[in-house]
Structure formats: C-alpha cells, structure tokens
Image: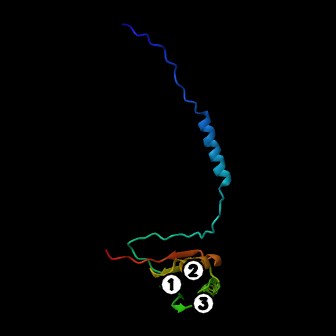
Amino acid sequence: MKFKREPREELELNLTPLIDVVFLLLIFFMVSTTFQKESEISLQLPRASDTETQAPEERIEVVINAAGRYFINDQELVKTDVASLQNALYEVSGGKRDLPLTIRADAQAPHQSVVTAMDAAGQLGMLRMSIATSRTAD
C-alpha cells in the first residue's frame, strides 16, 4: 500500500504589517512624549581617601541641623530662605567665589534644606563646593 503524498505549500510569515505597526507606535510615542529640562547644579564631588588632608585656613562651612536650621561658620541664621542664605554666604566669603565651601548636614535634616544650601551657593557662583560625611562604625 502506497500512500500518495501531496506536496505541501511552504508557509510564509509576512513581517511587513508587524514592522509597520511597530514604526507607527514608535512615531506615536516620539510625538506624544514631552521633554522637560530640570535645573541642575554641577558639583565636583570629593574622592574619599584614608589620608587626612590639611584644611585651608580660609573656608566656609554650612552646617544644617536636624530641624533644617543653617549655621555658617558656627553663626546661626535667623531666616532659612534662599535670599538670607545667599546674603550670609556673600558676606562671609567677601565676594570671593573660589573659597572652599563645605556643607555638613545632619542625617535627619530635610533634603530640601541641603538642596537650598547647594542652590544658594550655586547661584552665587561658588566654585569649590563639597559635602562632608562622617565614617560609620562597622
């Protein structure tokens, strides 16, 4: 008994409609997406090392306590707004933009207070800004 096999037609998968749909989706998302430029503060972050370096004699230190209060070189600011912080930084620096500025914030300090201090220094054009951290015990 011999079965006769009919030759099968090869199946083809047409990818053209799939590619068209993908391109249409791509174009839709490109057109409907909105891009928003956020304001940025460029920082030069310090590198950690085991050796301690000598701190320059003339420097500015901004301390932020847990309540969000500012202390510039151990003098507390009465107001906590950006303008007051800018004025105090300008007075302490004497208009010098190349003085090293260190921001030391309490771990429980509001994040907005730290950003406000960085923003005030950035608007004054402070060139050497760093954020101080402390080592944790293992």
Q: Are marks 3 and 1 in contact (CB under 8 Å)?
A: no
The C terminus sits in image quarter: bottom left
Q: Residue at x 67, y 54 (%)?
A: 32
Q: Amino acid at mark 3?
A: Lys
Percent x, y for residue 27? Answer: 66, 47
Q: Is residue 35 above or below residue 95?
A: above
Q: Amino acid at mark 2?
A: Ala
Percent x, y for residue 135? Answer: 38, 76
Q: Specify which label sits upstream in the sequence, 3 or 1.
A: 1
Tell me the distance, in whole angstroms, between the alpha carbons under discs 2 and 1.
Answer: 9 Å
Q: Residues within 10 Å of mark 1 (few under 14, many from 20)?
A: many
Q: Amino acid at mark 1?
A: Ile
Number of the label disc, if any, that sits on residue 79: 3
Q: Is residue 80 above or below residue 121?
A: below
Left or right of 46 in this view: 37:
right
Q: Residue at x 50, y 84 (%)?
A: 64
Q: How many marks?
A: 3
Percent x, y for residue 82? Answer: 62, 83
Q: Are marks 2 and 1 in contact (CB under 8 Å)?
A: yes
Q: Residue furthest top?
A: 1
Number of the label disc, if any, that sits on residue 64: 1
Q: Residues within 10 Å of mark 2 (few under 14, many from 20)?
A: many
Q: Specify which label sits upstream in the sequence, 2 or 1.
A: 1
Left or right of 29 in this view: 129:
left
Assign a secondary structure to mark 2: helix
Q: Residue at x 63, y 85 (%)?
A: 90
The N terminus sits in image quarter: top left
Residue designated by label 2: 117
Q: Residue at x 55, y 80 (%)?
A: 113
Assign a secondary structure to mark 1: strand
